[in-house]
């Protein structure tokens, strides 16, 4: 801020910022006291709606550097050359807690990454988990309602959480992940990130590939136990946020090695798992992750509200050579985020410094609305026009996908080895004995809070279907805690 006297919003010098005006020393206030009115009114409007999920988070800027030739797979220009660098902004978050909640909790972590590319901003709005609880967007509001506060009690209720998960067996894989050792990362720096969904890449010749993104932390994975997290959350609710800021202030820049799994389009129809089912991973033996880049965070935002609270990330922000897959969760998300941004930040949210393209400029014919800054000057606001305005390219960002069948409420198609439990069981069997013990204890501690026997039984049954031993141990642990 420039030097000089304190002013009003309109820039007039302020004489007294300690005493408001009144009719005589002991009398009532005056409507002519514009400073008082302006300050109180502005203060009332300091909050914008918090994100309906992922409200609590922290962000930082950095750099993505390409380390492998991926031009056979995608024509995205920011990926076109080894050594090429692109500015990024990454916002980490928890999911269920509201804006003021603690960081050290058992919850997935958001990993929302914005690449400021020369062909527009590319957003990859992922999590620290490779899978998700459900596979159809139509279930998302119901799912989140069970994670948030109950309309009657005003608290998160074990009954609601386990009722929904028990009745949604496809959640068994992600729930096993979440209650395992990686369910509470020690910090945002000590966890991996995933694009989670399958995305489309297409090369200059128009050949299509399906890809999954992985961001492997170079700091090493570090987690908290349930007990450590409970203590830390009470002592220092801002633990993750502070850790990230201080590390960057100290020049200890966190980084991630970026990998992709690549599936040729022709494999998708016959792959043993439905490759677009978000509750499943692609086993590395089938599609080995290939290293393609390095991500480093090296600059803190200067103003949290302007750059983190008002930052917007949308899964529909694609660039040429990258697009969506038919994953029905992703399809729902292609709508949900832009809608949330218009509600939460406003119709001109894309114009804010953190959100606008940094390596190109947005050239649209949209105009006006709340807080429009007049950036287009007197340029024509329609297209086609004969005044040299920007025009369409004729080339879609991504390639069309063949479809067949009739419209309707279709379940996600099932492939040869698909069921709701196979990968949850595989994950359980991969764990060491100590990990299994902690997993079972974490789950049992929560399930034991459920009030109804039928909900408890249904929840345990899903884990039994994943692995007999898993279900048996869980049942015993829950019984011991509930006394029945
Ligand atoms: C159909 C399913 C989903 C819907 C409808 C949905 C919807 C939303 C909405 C409305 C927001 C708030 C956006 C804002 O106010 O700026 C949000 C944030 C977020 N979601 Fe989702 N979500 C879904 C699934 C997922 C999945 C599967 C992932 C990860 C793989 C994910 C990751 C995130 C992240 C990281 C954020 C925070 C973005 C930020 O930092 O601003 N969501 N989601």
Image (tube, grey):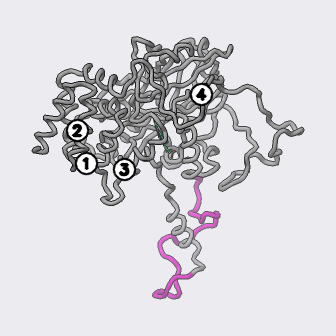
Sequence-earlier tag: 4 or 3? 3
Tell me if the residue at label 3 has its CB under 8 Å from ligand 1: no
* Residue 405: mark: 4
The kind of secondary structure element at disc 3 is: loop
| Residue 252 seen in render | no
The kind of secondary structure element at disc 2 is: helix
Mark 1 or mark 3: which is in front?
3
Q: CA distance from mark 4 to mark 3?
A: 38 Å
Q: Which residues are magenta?
A: 1-30
Q: CA distance from mark 3 to mark 2?
A: 20 Å
Image position of 378 (left or right of 131): right
Mark 4 or mark 3: which is in front?
4
Residue that appears at 57% across and 37% down:
334
In the image, 433 versus 270, the foreground residue is 270
In the picture of the structure, the residue carrying the numbered disc 1 is 234
The kind of secondary structure element at disc 4 is: loop
347 lies above or below 418? below
Residue that appears at 69% across and 51% down:
373
Residue 223, image x, y percentages = 28, 31
Residue that appears at 60% across and 15% down:
81
Q: Residue 255's quadrant in the figure? A: top left
Mark 3 or mark 2: which is in front?
3
């Amino acid at each position: 801020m420039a030097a000089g006297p304190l002013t009003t919003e309109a820039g007039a010098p302020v004489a007294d910022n300690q005493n408001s005006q009144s009719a005589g020393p002991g009398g009532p206030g005056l409507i002519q006291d514009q400073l008082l009115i302006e300050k109180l009114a502005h203060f009332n409007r300091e909050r914008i709606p918090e994100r309906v999920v992922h409200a609590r988070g922290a962000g930082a800027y950095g750099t993505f550097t390409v380390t492998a030739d991926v031009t056979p797979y995608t024509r995205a220009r920011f990926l076109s050359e080894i050594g090429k660098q692109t500015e990024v902004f990454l916002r980490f978050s928890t999911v269920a807690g509201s804006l003021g909640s603690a960081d050290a909790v058992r919850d997935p972590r958001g990993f929302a990454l914005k690449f400021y590319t020369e062909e527009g901003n590319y957003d990859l709005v992922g999590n620290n988990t490779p899978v998700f609880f459900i596979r159809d967007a139509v279930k998302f509001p119901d799912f989140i309602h069970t994670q948030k506060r109950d309309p009657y009690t005003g608290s998160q209720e074990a009954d609601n959480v386990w009722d929904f998960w028990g009745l949604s067996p496809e959640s068994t894989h992600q729930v096993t992940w979440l209650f395992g050792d990686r369910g509470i990362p020690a910090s945002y720096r000590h966890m991996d990130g995933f694009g989670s969904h399958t995305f489309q890449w297409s090369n200059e010749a128009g050949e299509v590939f399906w890809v999954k993104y992985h961001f492997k932390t170079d700091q090493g994975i570090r987690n908290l136990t349930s007990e450590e997290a409970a203590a830390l959350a009470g002592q220092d609710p801002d633990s993750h946020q502070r850790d990230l800021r201080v590390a960057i202030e100290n020049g200890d820049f966190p980084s991630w090695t970026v990998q992709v799994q690549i599936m040729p389009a022709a494999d998708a129809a016959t792959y043993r798992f439905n490759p677009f089912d978000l509750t499943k991973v692609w086993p590395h033996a089938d599609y080995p992750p290939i290293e393609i880049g390095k991500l480093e965070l090296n600059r803190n935002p200067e103003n949290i509200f302007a750059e983190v609270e008002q930052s917007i990330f949308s899964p529909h922000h694609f660039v040429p050579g990258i697009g969506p897959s038919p994953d029905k969760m992703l399809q729902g998300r292609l709508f949900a985020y832009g809608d949330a941004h218009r509600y939460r930040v406003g119709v001109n949210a894309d114009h804010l410094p953190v959100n606008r393209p940094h390596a190109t400029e947005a050239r649209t014919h949209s105009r006006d609305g709340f807080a429009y800054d007049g950036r287009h000057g007197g340029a024509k606001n329609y297209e086609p026009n004969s005044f040299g305005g920007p025009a369409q390219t004729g080339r879609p960002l991504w390639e069309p996908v063949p479809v067949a069948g009739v419209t309707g409420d279709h379940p996600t198609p099932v492939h040869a080895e698909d069921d709701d439990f196979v990968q949850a069981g595989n994950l359980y069997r991969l764990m060491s004995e100590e990990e299994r013990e902690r997993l079972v204890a974490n789950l049992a501690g929560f399930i034991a809070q459920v009030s109804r026997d039928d909900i408890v039984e249904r929840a345990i049954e899903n884990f039994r279907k994943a692995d007999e031993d898993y279900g048996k141990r869980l049942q015993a642990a829950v019984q011991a805690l509930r006394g029945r």
